[in-house]
Image (cartoon, grey):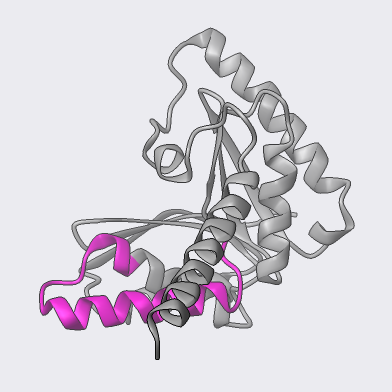
Amino acid sequence: MNTSTSLFKKSLMIAGIAATLGVAACNRNDGQMTDGAAADAPKESASIGAAMDDTAITAKVKQRLASDERMETAKIDVETNNGVVTLTGSAPSGDAKKAAEELARNVAEVQGIDNKIAAPGAMDDLSAKAENAADKAGTEISDATITTKVKAQFAADDMVKATAINVDTDNGVVTLKGEVASAAAQKRAIDITKKIDGVKSVDDDELKISQS
């Protein structure tokens, strides 16, 4: 391979990377924080005034989600803190997950999005990557890896994949919050979580059975 051909291929590669980054940037509206900053943002409003503003933002996002046919079978919870919207729950596909984020971003007052929606396929990929990373490191499984594995198992399970369950892990202790349709679904979610490698215990005090 001559030098000119090599340089041409490198140029194409650089252009492709730049184009990819450009598309990613377009997904975030001007003035909104990065996804990483949104994920690390405080999960509580800074003041009473901020809490009132956050409540209004949450209502607007929920209204957009409810009015979009792509969200018809999705089960998405919305929480806003200081303008940062956290999306949790489940979506029927990766496209629906992306659509939910897009709808939320287009609310003018939104400062950033922390998209934690579980979706088939996407969560499976994340789980596999997390497992590979843990195997290579040869260290104790991290809380983030445990959370990802639990969400992946929920998304793949017919009984619990349509439920809105928030998963949080702290030092191997997994906390499950939200509502499930039945006692059977509640038990299934707990049993799935207990079987994940690295889970020390499960706190299910806030995993309730829907009264509707």
Considering only vertical position in the picture, is 44 above or below 147? above
Whether residue 191 is visible: no
Q: Main secondary structure of the magenta part?
A: helix
Queried whether the magenta region covers residue 46, the answer comes back as: no
Q: As drawn, is 96 to the left or to the right of 10?
A: right
Question: What x and y, as percent, mark residue 96?
Answer: 73, 63
* Foreground residue among 164 and 84: 84
Whether residue 5 is visible: yes
Q: Which residues are magenta?
A: 117-146
Considering only vertical position in the picture, is 114 above or below 106? below
What residue is drawn where x is 79% and y is 58%?
71
Q: As drawn, is 150 to the left or to the right of 135?
A: right
Question: What x and y, as percent, mark residue 202?
Answer: 31, 64
Queried whether the magenta region covers residue 125, the answer comes back as: yes
* Foreground residue among 131 and 28: 28
Question: What x and y, as percent, mark residue 157?
Answer: 57, 82
